[in-house]
Amino acid sequence: MLKHQGMNKIFVPLPVWLCKLLAAVMERMMARPPLTQYAIARIVQDANLDHSSATEDLGYRPVGFREGLQKCFPIQSQVKSQGLKSVYSQEPSQPREPIP
């Protein structure tokens, strides 16, 4: 997601066993740990969802992660060149009229 927005961050892959160990230690030492054993279990769980019924009945067409990001959050250069409004715009929104 950072790469999509043109940002770079160091990515350090860690083995699952180490993440579980760190999460266990954090849970015991911190009131609100940023990483929990439950979160690790959810991350590594495979999710094979069958969308064949939605495809047949509704014409559902799943998209990949990167394509979905591009559709929801266009890259800034494309936003400017196509005259689109960015969701990251710092411009204040127009005030709304009060409802009588």
Image: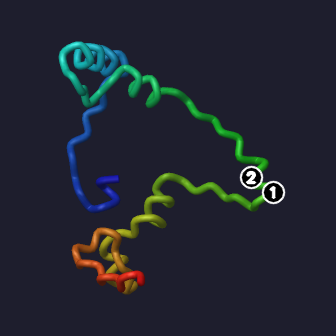
Q: Is residue 32 above or below residue 53?
A: above
For badge 2, the amino acid type reads: Ala
> Which quarter of the image is occupied by the C terminus?
bottom left
Q: Residue at x 29, y 53 (%)?
A: 2
Q: Is residue 56 above or below residue 79?
A: above
Q: Residue at x 29, y 27 (%)?
A: 35
Q: Is residue 62 above or below residue 10?
A: below
Residue 98, given in percent of the width and then of the height, sits at 36, 82
Q: Residue at x 26, y 30 (%)?
A: 34
Residue 49, given in percent of the width and then of the height, sits at 65, 39
Front residue of this view, candidates 92 and 6: 92
Q: Is residue 50 above or below residue 84?
A: above
Q: Quadrant of residue 46?
A: top right
Q: Residue at x 21, y 42 (%)?
A: 10
Q: CA distance from mark 1 to mark 2?
A: 5 Å
Display colour scheme: rainbow
**Mark 2 packing: few (<14 Cα in 10 Å), some, or many (20+)?**
few
Residue at label 1? 57
**Mark 1 packing: few (<14 Cα in 10 Å), some, or many (20+)?**
few
Front residue of this view, candidates 63 and 88: 88
Front residue of this view, candidates 71 and 100: 100
Q: Residue furthest front?
A: 100
Question: Circle 1 sits in a helix, a strand or a loop, which is it?
Answer: helix
Question: Circle 2 sits in a helix, a strand or a loop, which is it?
Answer: helix
Q: Quadrant of residue 73?
A: bottom left
Q: Disc 1, disc 2: CB below 8 Å?
A: yes
Residue at label 2? 54
Front residue of this view, candidates 40 and 8: 40
